Image (spheres, grey):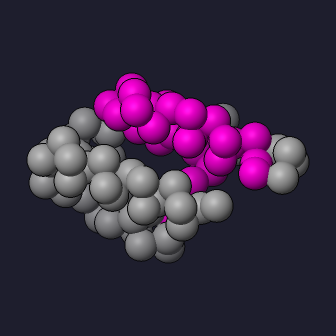
Amino acid sequence: MLMELLDRIKTAQEVHGWSDGEFAQQLGLSQSVLSRIKRGLRPLDNVRFLRAVAQAMPELRWHIAEYVIGGNGEHAEIRH
């Protein structure tokens, strides 16, 4: 489920035409942190990051909600 969400985020970034620098700025992250997240080297367990993605890319809100809830009905562990 994580990799599916990451793929959707990468695709949406391309559709918006944002470079990694522009996207990182939109999310309030450094480019290195964004790069680690996109490669799956840093977990998506931070509410602030997920909220920033949802604000920058409203079309992904449903997918983010599914990720947070968990595809099998279990809640993902999210840090505030």
> Is 33 situated left or right of 47 in this image?
left
Residue 48 in view: no
Question: What residue lies at 75% left-to-right and 41% top-to-bottom?
Answer: 69
Where residue 22 sits, quadrant-wise, is top left
Q: Quadrant of the C terminus?
A: top right
Bounds of the magenta segment: 42-71
Q: Looking at the picture, how far across and down is residue 47, in whole percent? A: 58, 37
Residue 68 is inside the magenta segment: yes
Question: What residue lies at 20% left-to-right and 47% top-to-bottom?
Answer: 15
Residue 32 in view: yes
| Number of disc labels | 0
Q: Looking at the picture, how far across and down is residue 68, in whole percent? A: 69, 42
> Is 62 situated left or right of 66 in this image?
left
Q: Looking at the picture, how far across and down is residue 21, in whole percent? A: 15, 52
Residue 26 to residue 58: above or below: below
> Is 31 situated left or right of 19 in this image?
right
Question: What residue lies at 35% left-to-right and 34% top-to-bottom?
Answer: 57
Residue 67 is inside the magenta segment: yes
Q: Taken as a whole, is the magenta stretch helix, strand or loop?
A: helix
Question: What residue lies at 84% left-to-right and 52% top-to-bottom?
Answer: 72
Q: Nearer the viewer, residue 80 or 70?
A: 70
Q: Quadrant of the N terminus?
A: bottom right
Q: Looking at the picture, how far across and down is residue 62, in whole percent? A: 56, 34
Q: Nearer the viewer, residue 27 or 12?
A: 12
